[in-house]
Image (spheres, helix red, strand yellow):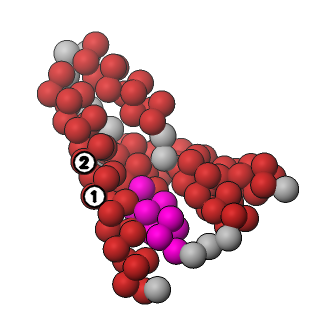
Amino acid sequence: MTALLVVLGAAVGAPLRYVVDRAVRARHESMFPWGTLLVNVAGSALLGFLVALPVGPGWSALLGSGFCGALTTYSTLGYETVRLAEQGAGRHAVASAAANVALGLAAASAGMLTAGALA
């Protein structure tokens, strides 16, 4: 049952990641991967929020592992960082990697603090 919940959450998170990335790219002509940064930060905030709540294992599997796991994307971050470096955009590559880590951690912390304040 847990695996099914993860799959169901991922079935929503992965397409949402794609749609958000495409929407951001359509509005911003930039080498910087703004769409990946947006989904990673948003997913980190939501996961931080969920971790701090007293939710059961089913909700954790559905929303945490499934939805947030598919929404956020370390593999795309890695790919885009290498691609930027290969294209001579080393500053963008470093900025993207640093921003994803720093803002992701800050967003997860903010999500946890928000959940703690609501509980």
Q: Is residue 80 above or below residue 87?
A: below
Residue 108 locus on image (x, y percent):
37, 60
Among the 4 quarters of the image, the one containing residue 92 = top left
Q: Which residue ends up furthest to the left in the rendered image?
A: 91
Going by the numbered disc 2, the residue's amino acid type is: Ala
Residue 117 locus on image (x, y percent):
37, 84
Secondary structure under badge 1?
Answer: helix
Q: Which mark is residue 102?
A: 2
Going by the numbered disc 1, the residue's amino acid type is: Ala
Between residue 25 and residue 115, name the one nearer to us.
115
Among the 4 quarters of the image, the one containing residue 101 = top left
From the viewer's perspective, tell me whether residue 114 is left or right of residue 57: left
Q: Residue at x 43, y 77 (%)?
A: 115
| In contact (CB < 8 Å): disc 1 and disc 2 | yes
Between residue 5 and residue 12, name the one nearer to us.
5
Q: Which residue is mark 1?
A: 106
Secondary structure under badge 2?
Answer: helix
Q: Main secondary structure of the magenta part?
A: helix
Q: Is residue 45 above or below residue 65?
A: below
Residue 64 locus on image (x, y percent):
58, 58
Q: Residue at x 18, y 22 (%)?
A: 90
Q: Residue at x 46, y 56 (%)?
A: 43
Residue 84 locus on image (x, y percent):
28, 22
Regarding residue 26, the answer to whether it shows in the image is no
Disc 1 and disc 2: Cα gap in Å? 6 Å
From the viewer's perspective, tell me whether residue 64 is left or right of residue 112: right
Give the magenta part as a residue range.
Answer: 44-53
Q: Is residue 53 above or below residue 14?
A: below
